Image (cartoon, rainbow, N blue to C red):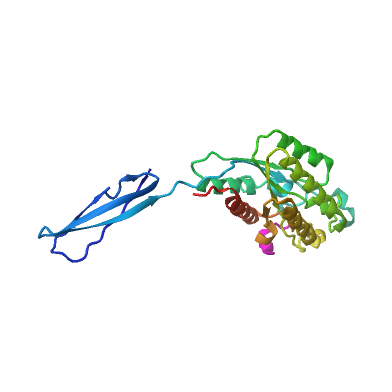
């Protein structure tokens, strides 16, 4: 039930005019439609009545409530504004040491579950961040990790965003179009693994990269190719697409200085896009 307030208005009649309503303003109304009748009586004891309906809708609910966000450092919430621990020649990229700092509390899964909890306040929601920095989609260990997670049947939905690391060669050099088919094949396998266990997959494109950043400089040209095939994959597999790249709208202010990782504002954009697609696909009809 819900307390509902209203104020009847009166026209004409000899003042003073008094009004009474049944049920009264401020009363608790049950979910559904309740008729309210208000009667106005003027100083000459003349009366008139009107009736209107108060409609109380049930709170919004999701059909599925247990989520796991699976991906790489972007899912984990890595801060790309951190500096290198040592300075080396660009020709010696293998020896670069990138310290991993997580924007605790600002990761997209954390922001997302807050958005969901605010709307679906009558439900208990679960959100686990299974992001692993440095992970490639097309790595047998990644599939093994994914399979272990979905085989646990602890979750109803996997939020899947992988592939950014696949277009890099391990030495910091990116822009490897030849790596895209392998990443797509791996994502397809993950979708099938989840589906075979009755788990929904929401497949995301990856954020854009800024060529002005030391990481984005070599990978940014391959991101559109990767995302085009992710969109095709979502269609062919019949899974909801979360077009994170489109949501960024090439706004590089949403990226960290490395040109690859989103900053806190960028993580919020990712969370909002997932939130919108979850609402579209999982919110129960009233």
Q: Residue furthest top?
A: 152
Q: Main secondary structure of the magenta part?
A: loop
Q: Residue furthest left?
A: 44
Query: Looking at this view, is 46 or 79 the one in front?
Result: 46
Query: Looking at this view, is 34 or 166 the one in front?
Result: 34
From the top left corner, tell me how far across and down residue 233 is, in percent: 76, 54
From the top left corner, tell me how far across and down residue 129 is, in percent: 66, 42
* Span of residues in magenta: 248-257
Q: Residue at x 29, y 51 (%)?
A: 36
Q: Residue furthest bottom?
A: 12
From the top left corner, tell me how far across and down residue 99 is, in percent: 75, 46
In the figure, is residue 129 to the left or right of 89? Answer: left
Q: Residue at x 60, y 50 (%)?
A: 281
In the figure, is residue 54 to the left or right of 104? Answer: left
Q: Is residue 95 in sight in this rendering? A: yes
Quarter-wise, where is residue 244 in the image? bottom right
Question: Was residue 255 drawn as part of the magenta stretch in this picture?
Answer: yes
Q: Is residue 107 in sight in this rendering? A: no
Instruction: Relative to 188, say whether 11 is above or below.
Output: below
Instruction: Relative to 101, say whether 7 is above or below.
Output: below
Query: Looking at this view, is 275 or 135 the one in front?
Result: 275
In the figure, is residue 253 to the left or right of 53? Answer: right
Instruction: Relative to 130, say whether 163 is above or below.
Output: below
């Amino acid at each position: 039930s819900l307390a509902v307030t209203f104020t009847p208005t009166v026209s004409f009649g000899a003042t003073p005019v008094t009004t009474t309503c049944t049920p009264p303003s401020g009363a608790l109304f049950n979910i559904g439609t309740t008729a309210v009748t208000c009667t106005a009586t003027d100083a000459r004891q003349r009366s008139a009545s009107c009736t209107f309906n108060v409609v109380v809708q049930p709170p919004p609910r999701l059909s599925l409530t247990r989520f796991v966000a699976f991906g790489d450092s972007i899912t984990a919430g890595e801060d790309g504004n951190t500096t290198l621990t040592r300075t080396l020649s660009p020709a010696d990229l293998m020896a670069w040491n990138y310290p991993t700092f997580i924007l605790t509390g600002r990761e997209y899964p954390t922001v997302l579950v807050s958005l969901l909890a605010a709307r679906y306040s009558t439900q208990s929601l679960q959100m686990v961040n299974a992001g692993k920095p440095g992970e490639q989609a097309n790595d047998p260990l990644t599939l093994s990790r994914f399979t272990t997670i979905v085989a646990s049947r602890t979750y109803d939905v996997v939020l899947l965003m992988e592939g950014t690391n696949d277009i890099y060669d391990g030495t910091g050099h990116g822009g490897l179009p030849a790596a895209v088919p392998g990443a797509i094949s791996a994502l397809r396998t993950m979708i099938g693994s989840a589906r075979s266990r009755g788990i929904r997959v929401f497949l995301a494109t990856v954020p854009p990269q800024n060529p002005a950043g030391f990481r984005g400089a070599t990978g940014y040209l391959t991101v559109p190719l990767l995302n085009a095939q992710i969109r095709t994959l979502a269609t062919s597999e019949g899974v909801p697409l979360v077009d994170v790249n489109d949501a960024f709208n090439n706004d590089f202010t949403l990226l960290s200085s490395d040109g690859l990782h989103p900053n806190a504002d960028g993580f919020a954009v990712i969370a909002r896009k997932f939130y919108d697609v979850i609402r579209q696909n999982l919110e129960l009809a009233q």
